[in-house]
Amino acid sequence: MLAKFFTVCIILGQLNAAEILNSTNCGSRYGCFYNPKNCDSDQCEFVAKWRQIDSQVEFIIAAKFKNLKQKWLAIGFSHDKLMGNDSVVACKYNTENDLKIHNYFNPGQIDPELIDSKDPSSGLSDIKIINDKGLLICSFKRDISKNIENFFDLNQNYYILMAKGDLEKDGLLTYHGGDKVISQNKIDVSIALEAKSVLISTNFVKIHAILMVIAWPFLSTIGILFARYYKPIFPNVKSCGVQFWFIIHRPFMISVCLLSLIGFGFIFSYKNWTWTSQSSVKNFAHSIVGLITILLSLIQPAMAIFRPDKLAENRPIFNWAHRLVGILAYAFSITAVFLGVNMFVKNYHWIGLTSWIIWLIILVVLLEVFNSRSSTDKVHEKTNEFKIDENKEPTMGFSKPMILIIHIALSLLWTLTMILAILEFI
């Protein structure tokens, strides 16, 4: 064990940026790629070099950081161009005295698992790490093959991925967001060749997440509130015989369906029209819950097309079915949002999600209390045989409209906060 320790010990000062960024030996001594292509020391975001030495492959990876403190840099080997089910070697720069390179298997997009929890550097040797003016340079030798589960055999060809991000205090890797590149083709690391790299865009993922946040927590909540609690509002305002609450409810819920379908299209396109692997538990759960949400949201307008007349005998059945499907769709949507946030954004955004749920509970309780009081008042009037003016407009009092205004304001603020988080962390 002591010998193993000295084998993987960190040696500083034996690497330098000039040697790493020198591309003259690419295609002859080393296989490599640069991003951007042919970059110089001030422009290189990612650099990777490799060469086979007997039963190992030597890798030298480098990336530029604005503030090199608690950062990580990783190289991955993938069967496809998507994150998930990949072999990953991560270089961790916590402080100048806390430097590590660990070997991982990444089942999903975040939360990689150590290949060997007892020996995090299993399969790695000759580890060297240096900080050269904000350029993190990491060198190591990786065994071509090893009899360990999820240890990829480098005799096969893989897409090479590189990514970087922040390092948590406990050494965990945070999600890299848009800071990642991938080789254009699969690479044979036993051959010295100059490979092309391309930036991996997460724009479609961002669009998907933003559309879903707008559709469900924002639009659907308001649409449901009007249908459940605000039917008496503006009773004399009608359009083509349609009451005001329905004027709001219908376009909002149709927008939810449309935005959900568009968002589904964007994420499916990002995944190259393939379904998420079951080995990525969080991703798979998010995709299944999201799909159920979309299907339920499509059932709602389909049911509405065949809505019976108000006086029809089976109208109560429709009302309960419409309500039940709506509640299920909303519950699944919130679950999908939670799962999505868990995959990407930082821990403190759980505060935002939790506060949103707490507010929804408070909102529903308050509105149910108002509805209960309204029903009690009507019963009291009938019991005391008060004469009811049938031409008198229904009223909701002062507090109920104010609650709606407060909710819309808070909902806008919360939605904007989530959109900013999505743009920052995905």
Image (spheres, helix red, strand yellow):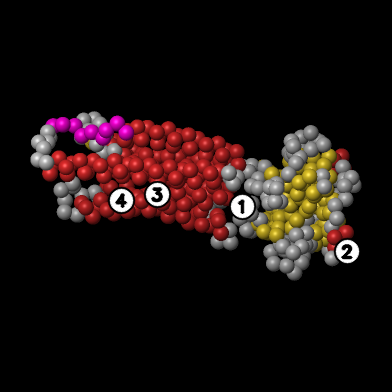
Say whether residue 381 is left or right of residue 400.
left
The residue furthest front is 384
User: Considering only order in the chain, which callout, 2 or 4, is on the residue closer to the N terminus?
Assistant: 2
**Tag nearer the camera, 3 or 1:** 3
Q: Which label's residue is closer to the chain start, 3 or 4? A: 4
**Residue 396 magenta-highlighted:** yes
- Tell me how far mark 2 sits from mark 1, CA to CA: 34 Å
Q: Amino acid at mark 3?
A: Tyr
Query: Residue 78, how many percent across, how many down?
Result: 67, 56
Task: For marks 4 and 2, give the CA distance.
Answer: 67 Å
Q: Nearer the viewer, residue 314 or 86?
A: 314
Residue 119 is a magenta residue:
no
Q: Residues within 10 Å of mark 1 (few under 14, many from 20)?
A: some
Q: Which mark is residue 109?
A: 1
**Which residue is situated farthest in the right direction here?**
14
Task: Give the amino acid type for the residue marked by disc 4 in the picture.
Answer: Arg
Instruction: Give the mark, 2 or 1, whose residue is nearer the N terminus.
Output: 2
Residue at image point 78% right, 53% down: 101
Query: Mark 3 near mark 1, Cβ–Cβ under 8 Å?
Result: no
Question: Would you say 230 lies left or right of 128 here?
Answer: left
The residues colored magenta run 391-399
Labelled disc at residue 3: 2
Circles 4, 2 touching at the beta carbon (< 8 Å): no
